[in-house]
Image (spheres, rainbow, N blue to C red):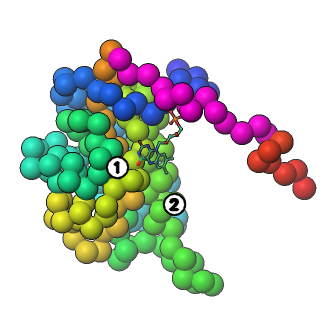
Amino acid sequence: MSFETLATNRYSCRSFSTQRVDPALVDKLLEVALLAPTAANRWPLHLYVIESDQAIEGVRNATRYHFDATLFILVCYDQEKVWERRVDGENSGIDDASIVGCHLMFEVEELGLGTTWVKHFDPEALREGLSLPDHLVPVCLFPIGYKAPDAEPAKSHTIRPRVEDVVSKI
Ligand SMILES: Cc1cc2nc3c(=O)[nH]c(=O)nc-3n(C[C@H](O)[C@H](O)[C@H](O)COP(=O)(O)O)c2cc1C
């Protein structure tokens, strides 16, 4: 599948079957996630594969956007390893984690699974529920599963800006 086809077909899936995801597919997802580039190639990230009942409960207590998934991947950046821009002290944690998130999101689609990028969680509740160490910052959470028969894109899925509204050629 070309990247263009993948990007065109992908949509936020919010309804999953109860079937557990094949562990071989999880391995594949992680393999592709780890190909992501990061600032200065530091890879200041830590991923959690969340599949135990206890950890899933931790997720469910931190967000209502869990969609009853039985598998989640959480991408965190590590404040002790992240690249920092000297001129203003900005770091690349969100950028680095988001590139990994994009790899995950599109690989999920390629493997015939579904996911939604979730940022709407309570970071402190997630930290507590998953016993995250203080130096990790949770950035994006992916509920992952086989798409349920009733899964479909939200009505807003096709709403996108026109080139002339968001692009300036200067
Ligand atoms: C950074 C980011 C955060 C998002 N957070 C959530 C979320 O917390 N809950 C949710 O249901 N969808 C979330 N989404 C999904 C968006 O709502 C969705 O991508 C957007 O409406 C476009 O729909 P589509 O993905 O089907 O094309 C998020 C997407 C992005 C990129």
Task: Please give left or right for residue 116 compared with residue 88 in the image.
Answer: left
For residue 152, which quarter of the picture?
A: top left
Horizontal side of residue 4 vs 60, given as left or right: right
Quadrant in which the C terminus appears:
bottom right
Measured as percent of width and height from the top left, residue 87 is found at 63, 84
Q: Is residue 150 left or right of residue 55?
A: right
Tell me if the residue at label 2 has its CB under 8 Å from ligand 1: no
Which residue corresponds to the image point at 51% horizontal and 73% vertical from the top-left?
Answer: 91
Residue 151, x across and y down, in percent: 38, 22
Task: From the image, tell me which residue sits under label 2.
Answer: 95
Question: Disc 1 residue type?
Answer: Leu
In-front residue for pair 81/119 = 119
The answer to which of marks 1 and 2 sits earlier in the sequence is 2
In the displayed image of the protein, which residue is found farthest to the top? Answer: 149
Q: Tell me, yes or no, whether the highlighted magenta stretch contains residue 153.
A: yes
Q: CA distance from mark 1 to mark 2?
A: 15 Å
Is label 1 within 8 A of ligand 1 (CB to nearest ligand atom)?
A: yes
Q: Is residue 17 above or below residue 79?
A: above
Where residue 125 appears, as percent x and y from the top left, is 23, 63
The circle on residue 141 is: 1
Give the residues in magenta. Answer: 150-163
Q: Nearer the viewer, residue 50 or 1?
A: 50
Figure check: 100 above or below 90: above
- As drawn, the label of residue 123 is none
Mark 1, other Cα within 10 Å: few <14 / some 14–19 / many ≥20: many
What amino acid type is highlighted by mark number 2? Asp
- The reply to whether residue 22 is in sight is no
